Amino acid sequence: MAIQRKPLVAGNWKLNGSDSLVEEMSSALQKAEISSSDVVICVPAPYLAKFQSSGFDIGAQDVSEHDAGAYTGEVSAEMLAECGAKWVIVGHSERRTYHAESDSQVAQKAAMAIKAGLTPIVCFGEEEEIRDNGTYTDHCIAQLAAVIDVLGIENFAQCVLAYEPVWAIGTGKTASPEQAQDMHKSVRDFIATHSADVAEGMRILYGGSVKADNASELFSQPDVDGGLIGGASLKAEDFIQICRSA
Ligand code: PGA
C-alpha cells in the first residue's frame, strides 16, 4: 500500500519580523485550528524562543556547519535546538547566492541539524538560465546527490526537501503545477535509485511565489507534499489559507 505523506507547510520569514508580528501570527494560527497539515514557521533566530509559546513548530533559516569554536556570528544546531527549534532550512538559494554556500557545505549543515535532532528542510533549485538551457533536472539532482553522499540514505530519509526554482522566488512567477510535479517526480525517482522506501516517504515541498490563490493547484499534484512559503507567510490570513489548501 502506498504511504500517505502528511502535507507540510513551512513559512520562511527571511529577514523580516518583529515582536508584534510574532504575537499576531501566533494568535492567528492558534485561532485558525489548522490540524490537517504540519505547520512550521522559520523565523529569524532571535524570535525562536518568543514564538515557542505559540504551540506551533518553529524552525531556523540557517545553521552553522560547525559544532563550536572560533566562528564569529554563527549559530550551531545544538543552540537552535536549545532555543526550541525543531526544524532548520538549509541550502536556501539566498544562502547559496549571497554566502556562496556549496553543495558540500549544505550537506554538512544538514548533517549537523540531524545530529542535534532537528529536521533539515533541504532546498534545491535551478536559476533561470539553467531552466532555459534544459539542464534543470540534472542540476537539481546533483545538488541532492551531494547531500546523500554526506548523509547516507538512512539519514537523508530524515530530511524534508524543498524544490525552489530560483526564478520563482519572490518574483511572482510561480512554476506551473506541471513544472513542479515534473521536477518532484524526477527527484523521487532519483531517490528511489537509493531506496524505494525512502523515496516513497520523502516529503518534497514546492516553494517560489506560492500564494493563497495558487496553493491548492500546486499542492494537489501527486508528488507535491506542501510548500515553503516566503512573502505570503508574513500575512496571517494568506498563510492560514495556504495551510488549509494543504
Ligand atoms: P516566496 O519565497 O514565497 O516569497 O517566493 C519562497 C522562499 O524563498 O522560501
Image (tube, helix red, strand yellow):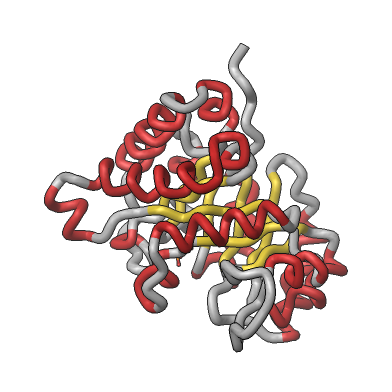
Quadrant of the image containing the C terminus: top right
Q: Foreground: 218 or 129?
A: 129
Q: Is residue 186 left or right of residue 71?
A: left
Q: Is residue 242 left or right of residue 77?
A: left
Q: Is residue 5 left or right of residue 179?
A: right
Give the residue displayed 14% in from the left and 52% down from the top. 132
Q: Which picture quadrant has residue 3?
A: top right
Q: Which picture quadrant has residue 57?
A: bottom right
Residue at the farthest front position: 69
- Compared to residue 63, the image places residue 211 above or below, namely above
- Point out residue 144 in the picture as x, y percentages from the top left corner: 42, 46
Give the residue displayed 39% in from the left and 31% down from the top. 190
- Point out residue 154 in the picture as x, y percentages from the top left corner: 61, 35
Give the residue displayed 50% in from the left and 55% down from the top. 107
Q: Foreground: 36 or 32?
A: 36
- Point out residue 79 in the picture as x, y percentages from the top left corner: 76, 72
- Compared to residue 193, the image places residue 23 above or below, namely below
Give the residue displayed 57% in from the left and 81% down from the top. 16
Quadrant of the image containing the N terminus: top right
**Residue 17: in sight, yes or no?**
yes
Residue at the farthest top position: 1
Label tally: 0
Residue at the farthest left position: 133
**Residue 235: in sight, yes or no?**
no
